Image (tube, rainbow, N blue to C red):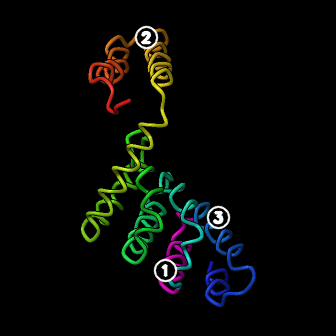
Amino acid sequence: VLGFSRSIALGGDSKLQDLLRLLTLWFRHGGHPDVQSAMRSGVAALPVTTWLDVIPQLIAKLGTADADVRLGLQELLSRLALEHPQAFIYPLTVAASEHLGGARRAAAASVLRAMRERFDTLVEHAAMVSNELIRASILLPELWHEALEEASRLYFRAKDVRGMLSALRPVHALMARGPETAR
């Protein structure tokens, strides 16, 4: 880990490759105390701009089961957000959207809350654009198909009538609201 950090800091032709290998080591072995301390010192020693090339990989691993790795990622992304908020506001907003679940969504929302303190307007506009793009890209038949599949699974496999109804309520509410755009 320290060797990769040093290689990345020195630059060179294989900087991105070394950075990806460092991330692989971090994600696989980040639970070990030695790796944690080496990553902390390595992340602190590298310029923030180093991480701009691997934003998708960082956001994809926000949902990792290892709490120490997840916390390290959140700290790194928060640091990155203060210096380059526009570089990853959209992918972070998508990761924090209601369409994804679990630890990744919670971690992305946590980073967005930290960003909101300094860049409230940017976060608001990114959330609005993200929600509109998601809303415009998902067709009503697709929503119904997904909701009916989930409701069917809950009813027939889990025998959960309340769960089935709660899976269908959001789509019914969407239909009751009517269209949001003029034709």
Q: Earlier in the sequence, mark 2 or mark 1?
A: 1
Secondary structure beneath dot 3 equals helix
Identity, as a three-letter code, of the amino acid under mark 1: Val
Whether residue 20 sits left or right of residue 95 in the image: it is right
- Estimate the spatial distance between the alpha carbons at disc 3 and disc 2, rounded to whole Å: 41 Å
Using a 10 Å C-alpha cutoff, classify the residue at mark 3 as few (fewer than 14 neighbours), some (14 to 19) or many (20 or more).
few
Which segment is the magenta one?
30-45
Instruction: Provide the residue designation for mark 3.
Output: 24
Q: Earlier in the sequence, mark 3 or mark 2?
A: 3
- Residue 155 - label: 2
Identity, as a three-letter code, of the amino acid under mark 2: Tyr
Secondary structure beneath dot 1 equals helix
Q: Position of residue 178 (x, y in %)?
A: 30, 23
Q: Which quarter of the figure is the N terminus placed in?
A: bottom right
Whether residue 120 sits left or right of residue 99 in the image: it is left
Q: Earlier in the sequence, mark 1 or mark 3?
A: 3
Q: Is residue 34 magenta?
A: yes
Assess whether mark 1 and mark 2 are in contact (beta carbons under 8 angstroms).
no
Whether residue 176 sits left or right of residue 13 in the image: it is left
Identity, as a three-letter code, of the amino acid under mark 3: Thr
Q: 149 and 144: which one is in front? A: 144
Assess whether mark 2 and mark 3 are in contact (beta carbons under 8 angstroms).
no
Name the residue rendered at 44%, 44% in the picture: 133
- Estimate the spatial distance between the alpha carbons at disc 1 and disc 3, rounded to whole Å: 19 Å
Task: Choose mark 1 or mark 3, whichever is in front.
Answer: 1
Q: Position of residue 132 (x, y in %)?
A: 39, 43
Name the residue rendered at 62%, 60% in the picture: 28
Instruction: Provide the residue designation for mark 1.
Output: 48
Task: Choose mark 2 or mark 1, whichever is in front.
Answer: 1
